[in-house]
Amino acid sequence: METKLRALVGRTVVVWTNMGNASARDEGTFEEFDGIFVRVRAGDETMYFPYTAIRLIKVVE
């Protein structure tokens, strides 16, 4: 799994996450997967997602 996610570095992605009853959709540039967290940058904002909360990652470009 790590190799596949690391192949996304530099790509624009949409990340769908689930946290309890809430779900979210975030878009940005995939920067890193360290084995636990996915890091995505959107402008000046950096977002960290635990991989267990991620439902889907879709490449936009």
Image (cartoon, rainbow, N blue to C red):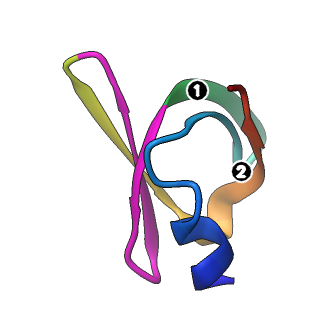
| Residue range corresponding to the magenta coloring | 29-43
Q: Quadrant of residue 33?
A: bottom left
Identify residue for label 2.
Answer: 20
Residue 14: image location, x then y, percent: 67, 31
Residue 59: image location, x then y, percent: 72, 37
* Extreme residue in the left direction: 44
Classify residue 16 as left or right of residue 32.
Answer: right
Quarter placement of the N terminus: bottom right
Residue nearer the viewer, 51 or 42: 42
Instruction: Say if 29 sits above or below 57 in the image.
Output: above
Instruction: Say if 34 sits above or below 37 in the image.
Output: below
Quarter placement of the C terminus: top right
Mark 2 lies on a secondary structure that is: loop
Classify residue 33 as left or right of residue 20.
Answer: left
- The overriding secondary structure of the stretch rendered in magenta is strand
Residue nearer the viewer, 9 or 1: 9
Asked if the residue under mark 1 is in contact with the one under mark 2, i.e. CB atoms within 8 Å, the reply is no
Residue 36: in magenta span:
yes
Classify residue 37 as left or right of residue 8.
Answer: left
Badge nearest the viewer, 2 or 1: 1
Q: What's the residue type where badge 1 is placed?
A: Asp
Mark 1 lies on a secondary structure that is: strand
Q: What's the residue type where badge 2 is placed?
A: Gly
Between discs 2 and 1, the one toward the N terminus: 2
Instruction: Say if 21 sits above or below 25 in the image.
Output: below
Residue at 43%, 67% in the rendered image: 37
Label disc, if present, on residue 26 of the rendered structure:
1
* Distance in Å between CA atoms under marks 2 and 1: 17 Å
Residue 2: in magenta span:
no
Residue at 46%, 83% in the rendered image: 35
Residue 57: image location, x then y, percent: 73, 47
Q: Quadrant of residue 29?
A: top left
